[in-house]
Amino acid sequence: MVSAQLKDYTSAERDLNRSLRYLDTAYAHYYLGEVYEKQGNVQTAFQHYQTASQAGGEIASKAQARMQGLTNRG
């Protein structure tokens, strides 16, 4: 997350993918979706948001909103 906040998206992507190998969480998918979205990889971002949206709770709501935003962008 720190790498993403510093806009070091390559490191953030690497770290989040590594995290998912150890523990598959909705939060990791959501933040990886953000990283991919900022890199312009909308399709992969959407897939990660979709996974996060299945978890329920606040993170699912945030993921659904991001998916809607991507869909509206065209």
Image (tube, rainbow, N blue to C red):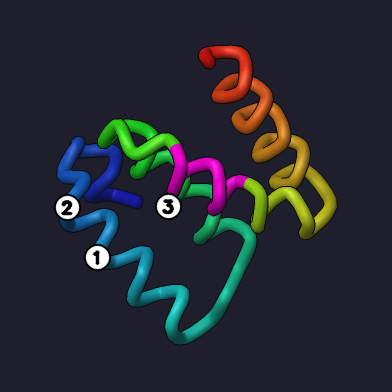
Residue 74 lies, with reference to residue 41, above or below; the image says: above
Q: Residues within 10 Å of mark 3 (few under 14, many from 20)?
A: many
Q: Residues within 10 Å of mark 1 (few under 14, many from 20)?
A: few
Query: Does 27 sit left or right of 15 as displayed?
Result: right
Q: Which residue is mark 1?
A: 14
What is the C-alpha distance between the residues marked 2 and 1? 6 Å
Helix, strand or loop at label 1? It is: helix
> Which of these two is toward me, 15 or 49?
49
Q: Which residues are magenta?
A: 43-49
Q: Which residue is mark 2?
A: 10
Q: Looking at the picture, which amino acid does disc 3 mark?
A: Leu
Query: Does 49 sit left or right of 7 as displayed?
Result: right
Helix, strand or loop at label 3? It is: helix
Q: Residue furthest bottom?
A: 22
Q: Which residue is mark 3?
A: 32
Q: Looking at the picture, which amino acid does disc 2 mark?
A: Thr
Q: Residues within 10 Å of mark 2 (few under 14, many from 20)?
A: few
Q: Residue at x 28, y 49 (%)?
A: 2
Q: Earlier in the sequence, mark 1 or mark 3?
A: 1
Helix, strand or loop at label 2? It is: helix
Q: Residue at x 35, y 43 (%)?
A: 35
